[in-house]
Image (tube, grey):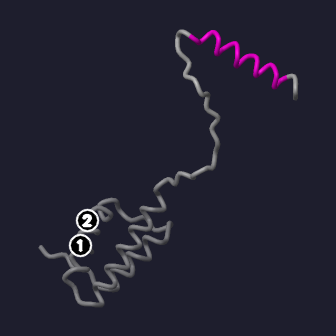
């Protein structure tokens, strides 16, 4: 069975994807990319352009759903010596003294 879509079908699908009020069935989202890829490779020039347009809209919709992680500038202040079981009490005393000093100065 050969699936074909007319250019007007592809325009309608593209509009549906860009309109959040249109609810497309999930099985369309899984079958449609392969159909469009076939058209983009084997169709007429006009059909290839229309298929590419719809594939781009589908890709953009997927990108919009993907959470974006914001890169935030930040600084770290690292201790020079590692804390080990042998020096933990000394390091704890040093940190508590620093915290106490900070608390007094604020």
Q: Residue visible at 46% across and 56% down?
A: 66
Q: Which residues are magenta?
A: 87-103
Q: Main secondary structure of the magenta part?
A: helix
The quadrant in which residue 79 appears is top right
Q: Secondary structure at mark 1?
A: helix
Tell me where residue 87 appears, x and y as whole percent: 58, 12
Q: Indicate left or right for 77 with 27 as reference.
A: right
Screen quadrant of the N terminus: bottom left
Q: Which mark is residue 35?
A: 1
| Residue that mark 2 sits on | 31
Q: Nearer the viewer, residue 26 or 41?
A: 41
Extreme-left residue of the structure: 1
Question: In this picture, is 81 found above or below 85?
Answer: below
Tell me where residue 86 appears, x and y as whole percent: 54, 9
Q: In whole angstroms, how far apart are the C-alphas of marks 2 and 1? A: 7 Å
The quadrant in which residue 99 appears is top right
Q: Is residue 91 magenta?
A: yes
Q: Secondary structure at mark 2?
A: helix
Question: In this picture, is 80 found above or below 27?
Answer: above
Question: In this picture, is 70 found above or below 53?
Answer: above
The quadrant in which residue 57 appears is bottom left
Q: Is residue 102 magenta?
A: yes
Q: Which mark is residue 64?
A: none
Q: Residue visible at 48% across and 62% down?
A: 64
Question: In this picture, is 77 found above or below 17?
Answer: above
How packed mark 2 is, by other alpha carbons closer than 10 Å (few <14, some 14-19, many 20 or more), is few
Q: Indicate left or right for 6 with 13 as reference.
A: left
Whether the residues at callouts 2 and 1 have beta carbons within 8 Å, the answer is: yes
Q: Indicate left or right for 45 with 16 as reference.
A: left
């Amino acid at each position: 069975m050969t699936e074909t879509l007319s250019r007007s079908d592809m325009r309608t699908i593209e509009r549906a994807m860009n309109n959040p009020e249109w609810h497309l069935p999930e099985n369309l989202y899984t079958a449609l990319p392969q159909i469009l890829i076939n058209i983009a490779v084997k169709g007429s020039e006009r059909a290839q352009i229309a298929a590419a347009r719809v594939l781009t809209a589908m890709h953009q919709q997927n990108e919009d759903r993907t959470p974006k992680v914001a890169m935030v500038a930040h600084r770290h202040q690292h201790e020079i010596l590692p804390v080990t079981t042998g020096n933990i009490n000394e390091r704890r005393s040093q940190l508590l003294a620093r915290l106490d000093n900070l608390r007094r100065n604020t």
